[in-house]
Image (spheres, grey):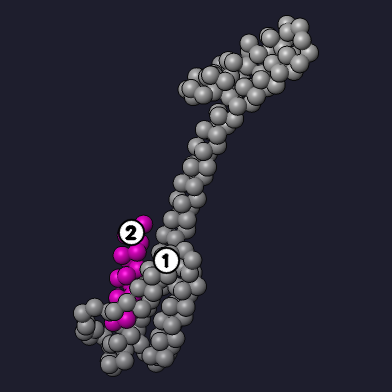
Amino acid sequence: MDMSDQSFRSFSRAIWGDWLARMSGPASVPAAILTVYADDWWARIAFGLTMFACAWFAAYRIWVSEHERVVSLEIKLDEKRSADDLRRILGEIFDEAQKLCGAVISDGYGEENWRSDIEALMQKTHDSLNGKISDIELNVLLFAPMGQKLLFIERKTENQDRLQHFIHYFRERLMHLIDKL
């Protein structure tokens, strides 16, 4: 079966599936016949215009139906692409947060470096997600209360413990956002 036959069959099914298109499409055929056989010139013009209007309206009804379906599918595709993009961005941020959670403070990588990396991640998070998630979700992700105070044995100072606490709960909120997608 060639493509034109299948397209014509689909077109015919679309016409017969829409009552208004069925009523106006076939009405164009008698109007076309009357246009040819009418004696009066004005009657021919009237029947010709009627034929054109009926055929145009039938085609329009089919187009509207198909167009709405295409627009709906395009919206779904855009939403899926947006969700995939958001999932990728959140995954990258999560990986960086995971690294920062396990960062070892040493002579070569001090507390100030760690703090600077955490602040850079917060800025990257804000810049990457601004406009992709709601302002409320972004504020919760960046500034929500930390929850129960945890003790991190590997952290030597109160400040290190506080930073570890912050990055730990930030990572938890990231996981929650990823799970929602």
Image location (x, y in percent) of residue 138: 40, 71
Q: Mark 2 or mark 1, which has the lower sequence index? A: 1
What are the residue bounds of the magenta stretch?
165-181
The main secondary structure of the magenta stretch is helix
Q: Residue at x 35, y 73 (%)?
A: 140
- Helix, strand, or loop for circle 1? loop
Q: Residue at x 29, y 79 (%)?
A: 145
**Quadrant in the picture for residue 135:** bottom left
Q: Is residue 17 visible?
A: yes
Q: Residue at x 31, y 89 (%)?
A: 160
- Frontmost residue, 65 versus 139: 65
**Quadrant in the picture for residue 162:** bottom left
Report whether 174 appears left or right of 66: left
| Residue position for label 1 | 134
- Residue 14: assigned label: none
- Frontmost residue, 43 versus 50: 43
**Quadrant in the picture for residue 47:** top right
Image location (x, y in percent) of residue 109: 41, 88
Residue 47 position (above or below residue 178)? above
Locate the C terminus by quadrant.
bottom left
Locate the N terminus by quadrant.
top right
Report whether 82 appears left or right of 44: left
The residue type indicated by label 2 comes to Lys
- Mark nearest the camera among 2 and 1 is 1
| Residue position for label 2 | 180
Label 2 vs label 1: CA separation? 13 Å
Image location (x, y in percent) of residue 45: 74, 18
Residue 76 position (above or below residue 148)? above
The residue type indicated by label 1 comes to Ser
Q: Is residue 174 covered in magenta?
A: yes
